[in-house]
Image (cartoon, grey):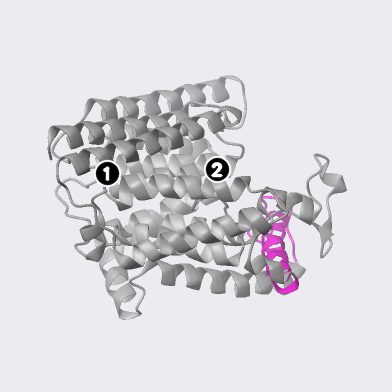
Amino acid sequence: MNQCIKRINNFNIFNIYIYILLVFFVLPVEQQKIADIILVIISMISVILTWYCKERHGYKIKFSFLDFAIFIFLALVYIMILLISQYSKMYITQNLAFLMVIIYYFYRDNLKLDESKKTIISDSVYWGMCLSLLFQFYICIRNGEDLHLITTWDDNYSGIIIFLFFLFNYKNNKKFGKLITILYIVYLKSRGFVLMIVLFYIIKIFKSFIDKAKNMFFLNKIFKIFIIMIVFIYFFSILWVYNISTSNLKPYKQGINDTSNRIRFLANVRVFDLIKENKSLIMYGYDNDLKKVLGINSEDTAEHQHFNDMRLVQTHNTILSIIIKTGILFSVLYLLIVSKIIDKYYVKENIEYIFPYLINSMYMHSLLNTSFLVFWVLILHIPQKGVKQQKSNSVDRFCNL
């Protein structure tokens, strides 16, 4: 690696690590959009600098034909949506921008992390994460409040952030960070967070068996997993809504068969109904106007539309959320690219870092797009000490811009 490329790589490491620290551990939700915009702008500058530097020093810039075709098709679909959709374009634009950022840093391998060297920036960010979580823990306990993070809008998303923090510590073998995770396991009221931790250790124990099973049943590609997830959530949502939750329904957080889970699965059923009813969803989605379309955009939840005698909410399933907001055509291409990115890290050593998160994405939205996807892919990208984790496949040949 020549000095020009090395400087850009160090610059990229700084950008991503500082972004993760600010968005997930420091900035309140309402201020995070600024950090998102800055990251995208700086990343575009890095793309230009990388191209210039590699051209100047005689590096060949390659793309596989399939990758190039998918990217062009995705861009054409996006332009078509801009021209014909009567709905907002903010959500799809944000998703596309972050996808380009992730492709540049991770899929094209412009962020190289050397496991033998502990950089000042990564260690500084780690301690910043720890101090932020301890401070927020102290404030909540002192004020007698339920434990939550200022960087997100919901206890369950606080749980996702702490789970990602846990994965970050486990990958880097940071013992103090693991102790902080234990504190949050005890005090954070998030069933999803506890489930992800339990799944992590179960999958870790049966890692070898799961690795053999995924190859035996032809589940060696993440896109196949996505398809199974959609089929499963369709049938399971119908089963839950029309059979399981029709009797013995419990109050909120008083059991698995509670009103919260019934509302979540009803939201999934409503999405599938909309897909059947509205053929234009093949071409474009409702974007950020989804709540208006569903009749749930009022701040007063008493005014929200009802579905099967329950208050309607937007789907909490990540893949369904992407489909209903961007349309079937764009979402298939988007998820295909995301799956190709994750495929790069879909090896035995990463199984416990992948499946708990994907399972959680089936009942929590926004996990396969924007900032959450950046944090998760960064964790997958981090080399585990003494372990060669990345695949040696066709993907790697085209990761040079």
* Mark closest to the chain's N terminus, 1 or 2: 1
Q: Is residue 309 magenta?
A: no
Q: Residue at x 39, y 47 (%)?
A: 102
Q: Is residue 332 left or right of residue 87?
A: left
Q: Give the residues drawn in magenta, as a range.
A: 248-277
Q: Main secondary structure of the magenta part?
A: helix
Which picture quadrant has residue 131? Answer: top left
Q: Give the SS element for disc 1.
A: loop
Q: Position of residue 372 (x, y in %)?
A: 47, 45
Q: Residue furthest right?
A: 303
Q: Is 100 in front, or is 234?
A: 100
Going by the numbered disc 2, the residue's amino acid type is: Tyr
Q: Position of residue 103 (x, y in %)?
A: 37, 50
Is residue 302 shown above or below 398? above
Residue 44 seen in the current view: yes
Whether residues under marks 1 and 2 lie with C-beta atoms below 8 angstroms apart, the answer is no
Q: Is residue 331 left or right of residue 340?
A: right
Q: Position of residue 99 (x, y in %)?
A: 44, 50
Residue 379 seen in the current view: no
Mark linked to residue 110? 1
Q: Is residue 258 magenta?
A: yes
How many residues crowd around disc 2 within 10 Å: few (fewer than 14), some, or many (20 or more)? many
Which of labels 1 and 2 is toward the front?
A: 1
Quickly name the residue at label 2.
Answer: 157
Q: Is 22 in front, or is 144?
A: 22
Q: Is 214 in front, or is 371?
A: 371
Q: Residue at x 62, y 57 (%)?
A: 81
Q: Residue at x 46, y 59 (%)?
A: 358
